[in-house]
Amino acid sequence: MNKLMTTALAGAMAFGASAASAADEVRLQLQWVTQAQFAGYYVALDNGYYEEEDLDVTILPGGPDIAPPQVLAGGGADIMLNWMPSALSARENGLPVVNIAQPFKSSGLMLTCWKDTGITSPEDFRGKTIGVWFFGNEFPFLSWMSQVGIPTEGGEDGVTVLKQGFNVDPLLQKQADCISTMTYNEYWQVIDAGIPEEDLIVFKYEDQGVATLEDGLYVLESSLDDPAMVDKLARFVKASMKGWAYSAENPEEAAEIVLENDATGAQTEKHQIRMVGEINKLVDGSDGKLDMSAYERTVKSLLSGGSDPVITKEPEGATTTVVTDKM
C-alpha cells in the first residue's frame, strides 16, 4: 500500500471514529432567564451527567419576550419547560405538546398582599387590584377566581387585574393590593426591598387547593414517533434528575454553578442560594415521573372555570410514560 493510500485510509478511519463518537444533541428551552429555578439542568451540564449519557445539551435561557411553546413549535428547541396550564391550553389550541416528565412535584405560586388592605381570605380580593403575570402564567389565577366565583373585570364585586411585569414594583409602589410571587423568587425580592414579613399576607395556591403543576418537560408529539429520539429523551431526563439530586445535596455549589452560567451577571449569590433551597422543596426528591393524581387535579382545576375555563375538554394524549419508563 502506497503512502497516499495509507494516509487516506487513516483519515477515513479517524473520520469514522469521530462520527461514531459524536454525542446526540439536545436543546432545552427554559421558561425564564438563567437562575436557580433551573439548577438541576445546569448542574447536570456542569458535572458532566449529560456527557455520561452521550448527550450534547444546549440550555437556552428564556425571558419576557420568549414563549417556550412558540420556540418548540418553530423547531428552535427539542424540549421545553412549561407550566402545565400553559401547555394544556396550547395543546387544546392546536399545538401537540406532550408532558414527558415532571421534575416539580408541587407549586411555588402564590399571591403576596399588603396586610393593611384588610385582606384575610380570597373573598376579600373583591374590589381589590391584583397583579398577574401573563404570557401563559395567568391561567392558574384565572382558574382560581372562576372557581371561587370572583369576576376578573373589576368593580366592587370583582378584582381588577393588573398585567404585572416580571418584578415586584406594583406592590412596592402600592399600585396593587396583591401581586403574583413565587416562593423561591419574587417573595424574597419584596423582603429584600425592606418590607417586613409581618406587613404581608400570602396565599399559596397549594394551600388554597387550586395549585397546578409547574416546570414540566414537554416535547412535540412527533418526537415520540422516533425510537431513537425517545431513547435520547430518556437519557436526558435521567441525567437531569441526577442533576436535581446533586442540587438538593449541595445547594451552595448548585447556586455557584448557576451563577457561572449566567451570562448577564444579574443574579446575586445570596438570592440564588436561597432560591436553590426553595426549589428543592418543590422537586422534593422527584424521579421525574408524572404523578397522575397531580395531573388529574390540575386538569380538574383548569376545567372548573365556569363560562370561561382555561381548557374546555378533558385532554387526550397530553402525557406519556414512554420516556420515563426507559430510565
Image: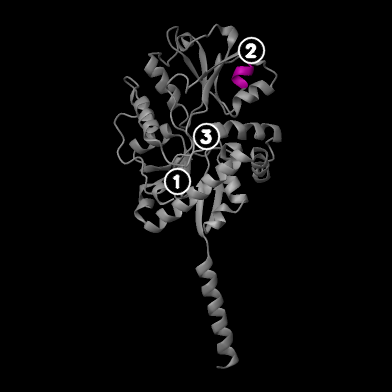
Q: Position of residue 233 (x, y in %)?
A: 45, 51
Q: Which residues are magenta?
A: 169-173
As displayed, is residue 4 above or below residue 271? Answer: below
Circle 1 crowding by C-alpha within 10 Å: few under 14, some 14–19, many from 20: many
Work out how far the residue at label 1 is from the one at label 2, CA to CA, in angstroms: 43 Å
Q: Tell me which label, 1 or 3, sits earlier in the chain.
A: 1
Q: Would residue 37 be visible to someone looking at this image? A: yes
In the rendered structure, does residue 171 fall within the stretch colored magenta? yes
Which residue sits at x=47%, y=38%? 82
Work out how far the residue at label 2 is from the one at label 3, CA to CA, in angstroms: 28 Å
In this image, 154 relative to 167: left or right? left
Q: Tell me which label, 1 or 2, sits earlier in the chain.
A: 1
Please say which color scheme the image uses.
Answer: one colour
Which residue sits at x=50%, y=53%? 26
Residue that mark 1 sits on = 72
So how many labels did they put on this image? 3
Q: Mark number for residue 203?
A: none
Mark in the foreground, 1 or 2: 2
Asked whether 143 or 159 is in front, the reply is 143
Q: Tell me which label, 2 or 3, sits earlier in the chain.
A: 2
Mark in the foreground, 2 or 3: 3
Instruction: Tell me the amino acid under the disc marked 1.
Output: Leu
Residue that mark 3 sits on = 284
As displayed, is residue 114 above or below residue 277? Answer: above
Instruction: Tell me the amino acid under the disc marked 2.
Output: Glu
As displayed, is residue 281 above or below residue 114? Answer: below
